């Protein structure tokens, strides 16, 4: 990453988000702060239920509210607090400056309309285009996302396209905005074949070059992180536990959870001798009964008494790398051995 | 698409044959001798034998069935025992009244039902939702004839706003053109420039429409609500919102179009059932349609009329189902392309 001074595009500041359920209050996101600079790709990593998607959906307010609720915090986009916007204003923001692609291309496109008309509808909504012009622009976008025979495919229904094609169509829809600023990609490759995954990631990389947008990429796949990310935020049980530039996270992971994620990668050099894949033992704690300690303590080989009683404050490894762990020094020492 | 419709049309024939067969044997298998039942207990043997010969009842059952089929194919449903008129002709005169009422009731039920269903789905778990769904429960639980009588009592007797029955103000000495009085009213509005026929036809339709349409309305509203709630959870709704599509459009275009699939099925079934509901409604409102006529025919054991009426209603039901099938493929592209 070049060390050019970049402007901040999105700043999530101390966000707390919870869901009211019949069993009690689920604190899905706690004290989360994230910044994304213009032109940057930030990946949000963590396992299912760690609050990645809730965070992403909090940005353009797609979480169901109620039961969801913002307890505190700000989400500044180009300096405007999105949480203070009225409903109509946030609707205008969606699809013009903040767009989104989803995990399941099978279900994320409306089955009863052609893909072309769905994309055209976005143009018509935001830019007041007529139907013909909007369809022509949709064809252009299909070219851009490298869908073969776009003039024909534009009239296809989602079920007539393959998974990869659908995801390309989704990306085209997300690009149907006048000034794409931020694209939120919520596990865009999880439901796809490995070969298609690579193609979609390449496409996203290319598009970012061409269009100059920022990407917030949500994933649980460290392989995707290595491929795409400028910076990485690791989340666990609603908390940010480590944040770093991409090189540092792979070379010098400081949080035991990050270390566990990296150790469970099949491409990890230590599997050259064909040992079993390493898994992180235990399971994610129940967000209902979670206390104020470090949420990873019950699964952590490094946990000490203090871990169970208080969440650690930030420790800066270098200016691009911070970790929230009481024992990050022991993680470092052990790795060195 | 055209091929699909043609295929469905061809498939209609065996269905209708089945209906005719069923109706024929149902009457043939009914205990007792129809001729004896028709003539009453004082008839002598000669009279009965004569009627049996007239009706073809002394032939073997299979031959009777063959004869009946060959007549039905030529739209000859026999003569009514009570009036002596051709059954097919009587039905031809009466069915516009029933169709008009049934269509009105269905439009009333579908439009209002879908609207209420969508509204209570968006306002889920608020007082709007509770009131609508409570009302719907009340609606399905009400017997048609009772609701009809209550409506007459309130709007005709107490408030004196609407007529108690019939299809047209009898003082107008109205001669029907198409027998669809609303259409006739429109024709006269343009031809003679008077709206009084149209207004009277509509006034007479209001109460029977509500009485007949309330149960389907309630069922459609409940189906729409649950279908909408399910569709609103789908990923593609989130996609539409994330693309900044306005909420109204998300609901009425993106969600409703998908939610309508089960609703269309229910509308089709209710439309068919409506015809049996029409028997009660037409009786309560002195509506001169198939329903009331069939009711009288059953009471008089007028077997040719009963058979004809049932065949007619069944064929209508089958046709409605065909329309539903076609609508289905219009709304759902997956069916269209298979």
Image (cartoon, helix red, strand yellow):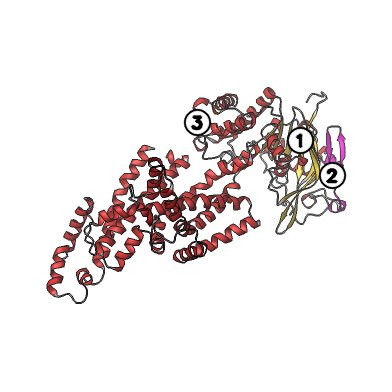
Q: Which residue is mark 3?
A: A155
Tally of numbered discs: 3
Residue B91 lies, in percent from the top left, at: 29, 55
Q: Nearer the viewer, mark 3 or mark 2?
A: 3
Q: CA distance from mark 1 to mark 2?
A: 16 Å
Q: Nearer the viewer, mark 1 or mark 2?
A: 1
At horizontal 69% and vertical 40% (from top left) the residue drawn is A220
Which mark is first along the chain, 2 or 1? Answer: 1
Magenta stretch? A305-334
Q: Nearer the viewer, mark 1 or mark 3?
A: 3
As drawn, which residue projects farthest toward the bottom? Answer: B42
Helix, strand or loop status at disc 1: strand
The answer to whether residue A263 shows anywhere in this view is no
Helix, strand or loop status at disc 3: loop
Query: Counting other residues with Cα less than 10 Å from the Cα at mark 1, is it few (<14), some (14-19), or many (20 or more)?
Result: many
At horizontal 28% and vertical 60% (from top left) the residue drawn is B22
Task: Give a yes or no on whether discs 1 and 3 share a subunit.
Answer: yes
The N terminus of chain B sits in image quarter: top left
Which mark is first along the chain, 3 or 1? Answer: 3
């Amino acid at each position: 990453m070049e060390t050019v001074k970049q402007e901040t595009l999105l700043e999530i500041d101390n966000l707390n988000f919870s869901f009211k359920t019949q069993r009690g209050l689920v604190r899905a996101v706690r004290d989360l702060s994230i910044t994304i600079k213009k032109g940057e790709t930030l990946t949000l990593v963590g396992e299912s239920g760690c609050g990645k998607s809730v965070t992403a959906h909090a940005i353009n307010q797609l979480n169901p509210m109620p039961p969801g609720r913002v307890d505190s915090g700000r989400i500044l986009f180009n300096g405007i607090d999105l949480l203070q916007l009225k409903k109509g204003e946030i609707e205008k923001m969606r699809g013009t400056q903040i767009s989104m692609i989803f995990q399941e291309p099978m279900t994320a496109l409306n089955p009863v309309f052609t893909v072309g008309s769905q994309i055209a509808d976005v143009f018509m909504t935001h830019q007041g285009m007529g139907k013909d012009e909007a369809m022509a622009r949709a064809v252009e976008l299909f070219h851009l996302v490298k869908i073969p025979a776009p003039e024909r495919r534009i009239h296809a229904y989602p079920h007539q396209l393959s998974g990869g094609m659908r995801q390309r169509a989704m990306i085209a829809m997300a690009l149907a905005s006048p000034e794409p600023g931020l694209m939120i990609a919520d596990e865009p490759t999880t439901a796809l074949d490995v070969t298609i995954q690579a193609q979609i990631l390449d496409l996203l990389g290319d598009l970012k070059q061409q269009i100059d947008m920022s990407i917030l990429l949500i994933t649980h796949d460290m392989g995707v992180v290595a491929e795409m990310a400028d910076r990485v935020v690791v989340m666990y049980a609603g908390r940010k536990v480590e944040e770093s530039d991409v090189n540092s996270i792979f070379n010098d992971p400081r949080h035991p959870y990050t270390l566990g994620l990296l150790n469970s990668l099949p491409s990890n050099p230590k599997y050259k001798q064909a040992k079993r894949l390493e898994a992180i033992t235990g399971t994610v704690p129940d967000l209902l009964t979670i206390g104020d300690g470090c949420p990873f303590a019950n699964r952590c080989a490094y946990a000490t008494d203090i871990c169970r009683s208080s969440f650690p404050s930030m420790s800066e490894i270098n200016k691009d790398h911070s970790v929230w762990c009481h024992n990050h020094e022991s993680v470092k020492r052990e790795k060195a051995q | 698409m055209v091929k699909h419709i043609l295929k469905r049309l061809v498939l209609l024939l065996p269905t209708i044959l089945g209906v005719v067969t069923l109706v024929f044997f149902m009457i043939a298998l009914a205990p007792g001798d129809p001729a004896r039942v028709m003539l009453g207990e004082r008839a002598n043997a000669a009279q009965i034998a004569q009627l049996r010969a007239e009706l073809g009842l002394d032939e073997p059952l299979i031959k009777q069935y063959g004869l009946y089929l060959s007549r039905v194919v030529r739209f000859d449903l026999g003569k009514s025992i009570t009036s002596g008129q051709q059954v097919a002709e009587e039905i031809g005169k009466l069915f516009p009244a029933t169709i008009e009422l049934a269509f009105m009731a269905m439009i009333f039920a579908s439009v209002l039902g879908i609207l209420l269903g969508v509204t209570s789905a968006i306002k889920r778990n608020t007082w709007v939702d509770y009131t609508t769904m409570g009302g719907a429960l009340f609606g399905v639980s009400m017997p048609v004839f009772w609701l009809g009588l209550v409506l007459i009592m309130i709007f005709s007797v107490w408030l004196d706003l609407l007529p108690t029955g019939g299809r047209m103000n009898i003082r107008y000495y109205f001669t029907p053109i198409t027998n669809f009085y609303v259409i006739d009213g429109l024709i006269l509005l343009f031809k003679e420039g008077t709206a009084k026929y149209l207004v009277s036809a509509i006034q007479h339709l209001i109460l029977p429409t509500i009485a007949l349409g309330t149960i389907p309305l309630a069922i459609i509203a409940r189906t729409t609500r649950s279908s909408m709630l399910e569709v609103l959870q789908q990923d593609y709704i989130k996609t539409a919102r994330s693309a900044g599509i306005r909420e109204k459009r998300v609901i009425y275009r993106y969600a409703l179009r998908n939610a309508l699939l089960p609703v269309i099925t229910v509308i089709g079934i209710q439309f068919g059932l409506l015809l049996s509901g029409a028997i009660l409604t037409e009786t309560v409102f002195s509506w001169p349609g198939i329903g009331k006529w069939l009711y009288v025919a059953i009471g008089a054991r007028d077997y040719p009329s009963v058979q004809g009426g049932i065949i007619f209603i069944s064929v209508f039901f089958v046709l409605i189902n065909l329309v539903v099938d076609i609508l289905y493929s219009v709304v759902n592209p997956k069916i269209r392309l298979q």
